[in-house]
Image (spheres, rainbow, N blue to C red):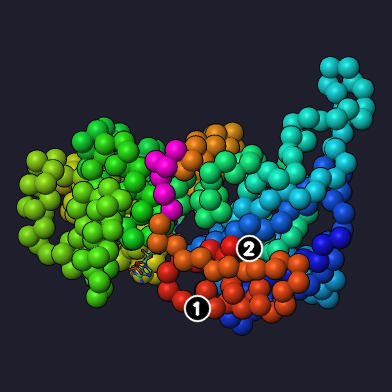
Amino acid sequence: LHTARTIIFSNYGAPKEVLQVLKHKLPEPGLGEATLKLIAAPINPSDINQIEGTYASKPEFSKRFGSSDAVAVPGNEGVFEVIGLGEPQTGIDRETNSKDVVNTSLNTLEVGDWVIPKKASFGTWTTFKNAKISDLISLGKPNGLTPLQAATIAVNPLTAYRMLKDFAKLEKGDWFIQNGSNSGVGRMAIQLAKLWGIKSINVVRDRRDIDELKQELHDLGADHVLTEEQVADRSIKTVISDWTNGAMCKLALNCVGGRSSTNIAKQLTDQGVIVTYGGMSKQPVGIPTSLYIFKDIHSRGFWVTKWKNNNPEEFEQMIQKVASMFRAKELEVTAINTVEFQNLENAPSEEFLSLFKSSIAKSGKYVIVA
Ligand code: NDP
């Protein structure tokens, strides 16, 4: 039996105040279950919002692991290794009507396979857990996939992929603009656009090492990188018009809101689309009336969790597709800080908790790697 360390919270609030850790013995996996060992789990903005209680999808609170209160386990994304399998799930064979037939679709996992959760709110911030096989997507054996890639496969690459495909008909040579370009999603959008021959204008916040960041994004495939101040300048429209041969951008991806969203919306062509998928500035999206009247621009929203729930089969196909892009080195996960947690079985529980708490307190994106 494994001893698991699981991060929990019983009330919504600031992560540094509400997060705790529980040490508990993991039972043997039940019927149709797998025992999973953590490989890596990221800390995404949505995880923080979920702990704060401001995220649309809520985790399940229940009494577990010997807790006296109902507790939830944070962590929407992550990759685990299958280290044990329970008895196969049996069912009724529809053709022969006989009972206790092994339902093969639920029993396709092998020990050593890497798996990710099918749905959000899985509770990935734990060293070990038992899960229903039907709640997992298998990535098979790693075969060149890294823990970082696998742990972050289900949210950022998919979000960028779907937003570039589903809102505007972007042909080779067409342009899109985005803010928050330094984010995980932004960096994926840069790489995918480059692969597909789509041109990108990327807005980032100014900083001391701005030239280095610009170079890094260019190296990933960005055509142009502008600071928020540069894109706010009135003269930028002529510059962008020159870059795009007068075509302007068909699509704007917005994860910031406020003035930043106004400035990227202004670079859209007639009937261009701005897709809002995040609100990092915590300011409302600001789109000038004139853009609606004179350009008939469209303002849409995207939430990958909803997309996955509405398109479960396509979601699994997309995961396999992105995994093969990682394996083929067409896509890379960059600018993520990794924090290692060693000795999963014996390290003090508080150490596991403090890795999450201290990573949340820092700026930048962190992935806990076991
Ligand atoms: P990362 O942690 O990788 O990046 C966060 C980004 O936000 C950085 O580029 C950072 O810029 C920027 N940022 C932070 N604070 C502010 C601020 N006050 N004003 C402007 N920019 C700011 O995040 P992810 O790629 O995981 O997520 C990016 C956004 O996308 C988040 O809002 C997230 O919630 C959203 N998202 C939405 C999804 C959906 O389905 N709708 C799915 C995935 C993500 P800097 O480099 O300057 O610090």
How would you classify the magenta stretch by its main secondary structure? loop
Which residue lies most toward the right here? Answer: 99
In this picture, is 154 found above or below 165? below
Residues in magenta, as a range = 328-333
- Pick the front one: 130 or 282: 130
Q: Quadrant of residue 259?
A: bottom left
- Pick the front one: 221 or 301: 221
Q: Say what amino acid the circle numbered 2 marks.
A: Ala
Tell me the SS state at disc 2: loop
The image position of residue 227, as x and y in percent, is: 21, 65
* Residues at circles 2 and 1 in contact by the CB criterion of under 8 Å: no
Q: Which residue is mark 1?
A: 361
* Quadrant (top left/top right/bottom left/bottom right) for the N terminus: bottom right
* Quadrant (top left/top right/bottom left/bottom right) for the C terminus: bottom right
Q: Say what amino acid the circle numbered 1 marks.
A: Ala
Lower position in the chain sequence, tag 2 or tag 1: 1
The image position of residue 307, as x and y in percent, is: 52, 43
102 to the left or right of 200 = right
